Amino acid sequence: MKDTHKHQGLRNQLVATIVEKGITDENVLKAIAAVPRHLFMDSGFENFAYQDKAFPIAADQTISQPYTVAFQTELLQVKPTDKILEIGTGSGYQTAVLLEIGARVYTIERQKELFKKTKIFLPKLSYKPKKIIFGDGYKGLPEEAPFDGIIVTAGAPYVPKPLLSQLKIGGRLVIPVGDKVQIMTLFVRTGEKDFEKLELGDFKFVPMLKEKN
Ligand code: SAH
């Protein structure tokens, strides 16, 4: 598990690429510059880690494209100490980006294999989420609600109601919604029953797995 000057150089180039694509939030850019993405990928893909692309991880899932991670994180407007819920832990890369910003992160993964792997892996890099949970993201995490932000990193066929209800007033939900292609959607909770909704372009995610009973 090495992180070298060469890797740092490649990360700086990656940051330049996502700045060109329109990301401006300094906290997000610093986090992308800091997280050693190559360590989150299987060794066969390590050399590609700083290309702005998604890559396969275990269990037929993918590590999201860095631009997408940056775009979603920027939409969340994460501030240090914010309480954030992530749906879809996967490789833990997005989790690490949130932790670099100083958020308190709760993250849920539905696949046992990935859950086990990432739960052991993140602390090895000194990334310590408040909780990594093996469970169903459609339900959110009522026992820890409300959250300043909720980020969904798989394509959701619809917007799960529990996620909206687990936001603080002023809190933000960032969720890609759709089947084959997803529309990045931002909800801001403006009151007990009121939400503002913004749609921010097309993205492609692996599908959010069905609800568990
Ligand atoms: N944030 C991850 C992206 C992983 S891809 C990263 O940076 O690597 C999406 C992840 O969502 C997969 O790991 C998948 O298993 C998980 N997932 C799919 N459906 C889910 C559900 N209903 N609840 C929780 N996680 C889910």
Image: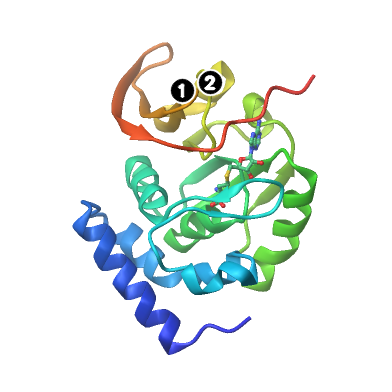
Who comes first in sequence, dot 2 or dot 1? 2
Residue 152's disc number: none
Image position of 85 with respect to 28: above or below: above
The percent coordinates of residue 2 (x first, y second) are: 58, 84
Q: Disc 1 marks which amino acid? A: Gly
Q: On the rendering, which quadrant does ligand 1 occupy?
A: top right
Question: Camera-side residue: 151 or 205?
Answer: 205
Q: Mark 2 points at which residue?
A: 157
Characterize the local packing of mark 1: few (<14), some (14-19) or many (20 or more) Cα atoms within 10 angstroms: some
Image position of 138 with respect to 193: above or below: below
Extreme residue in the front direction:
44
Characterize the local packing of mark 2: few (<14), some (14-19) or many (20 or more) Cα atoms within 10 angstroms: some
Q: Is mark 2 on a helix, strand or loop?
A: loop
Q: Residue at x 57, y 49 (%)?
A: 62
Disc 2, disc 1: CB below 8 Å?
Answer: yes
> Would residue 126 be visible to someone looking at this image?
no
The image quadrant where one finds the N terminus is bottom right
Q: Disc 2 marks which amino acid? A: Pro
On whether ligand 1 comes within 8 Å of the CB at mark 2, the answer is no
Question: Camera-side residue: 28 or 131?
Answer: 28
Q: Would you say 33 lies left or right of 115 here? A: left
Q: Mark 1 points at which residue?
A: 178
Q: Which residue is drawn at 52% across and 83% down?
A: 3
Q: Would you say 168 lies left or right of 23 here? A: right
The percent coordinates of residue 73 (x first, y second) are: 39, 47
